[in-house]
Amino acid sequence: MNTYEANFNKNLGALESYNATLADKIEDVKTNERFEVFAGKSAFDINIYDHELKQSLYDNPEKFFDEKYNEIYTKYERYPVLFFYGLGNGLLYKALLKNENHKSIVVFEPNIEILYIVFHLIDFSQELKDKRLYVVENFDKTHLSIFLGKELQIRNYLQDVKVFSHSYYYNNKNTSVLEKNIQELCSYLITELGNDPKDSLQGITQLLHNLPYQLANPSLKDLLKQRKGKIENAIIVSTGPSL
C-alpha cells in the first residue's frame, strides 16, 4: 500500500465516526475523472484542473497559499471556529489547524471527487478524529441545522458567522446563500438555547422598570394578611410564559 492509499484509508476511517454517509460516497468514487491533479517540485505546488469548467483551482498554488494563509492568520488568528466554502487542495487547512486557537474548521465542499482526491493527498485522520476538521457536502437547511446544533454543538460566540470562499474557483452565489443560511440557523439555535444577550438585556430592562412598582405595593404574604376573610373572590392579573 502506497502513501496515497494509506492516507485515503485513514481519512475514511476517521470520517466514518461522525459522517458515515459521506465516507461511503467518497469510497464509491473509483477514480478522478472530472478533475486532474498537477504536482510541482514544491510541496505547496499542487493544482487541480476541472476539465468540465476548463479551469484550475489556482493560478499559482504557492502564491495562493502564502496570501490566503497570511490573510486568515492575521485577521482571524484567535477565531475558535472558521467556515470555508471549498476544500481546494487541502493544504491551507492542514496549516491552519496547527493553530490551537482554531477549535474547529468546517469546510463545505460540493464535489465528492475533490474530497476523493484530497483524502489521497493529505492525512487528515487525526484532525477528523479530534473533530477539529469537519467536511460537509450536504447544504440542505435541515441537514445543516442538525450538524450545527448536534454535531458542532453550536457555540454562543457564533453570533456573526462568515463563510470564506477558498479561492476564486469557488466564487459564486452558493457561497453567499450558504453564509446566509448558516447565519440564520446559528441565530435560531443560539436563541433556542436561551442565551441570546438581547433577551438578557430585555429582561434586565423590564425588571428595573417594574422594580419601583413591586417595592411600592404589598408582598403576597402581606396581601393575604390584609384581605384574608374579607372577600370571597379575587382576580389575579399577570403575564409571562412561566405561568
Image (cartoon, rainbow, N blue to C red):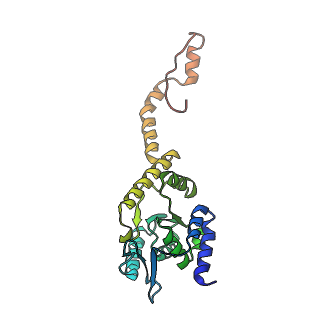
76 or 184, nearer to the observer? 184
> In the image, is 178 to the left or to the right of 125?
left
State whether residue 96 is above or below residue 189.
Answer: below
Q: What is the number of callouts on the image?
A: 0
Q: Quadrant of residue 168?
A: bottom left
- In the picture, the quarter occupied by the C terminus is top right
Q: Position of residue 187 (x, y in %)?
A: 45, 50
Q: Position of residue 135 (x, y in %)?
A: 52, 65
132 or 80, nearer to the observer? 132
184 or 159, nearer to the observer? 184
State whether residue 8 is above or below residue 83.
Answer: below
- In the picture, the quarter occupied by the N terminus is bottom right
- Residue found 57% across the figure and 71% down from its top: 127
Q: Position of residue 116 (x, y in %)?
A: 53, 72
- Residue found 46% across the figure and 36% down from its top: 207
Q: Position of residue 41 (x, y in %)?
A: 45, 90
- Residue found 63% across the figure and 70% down from its top: 13
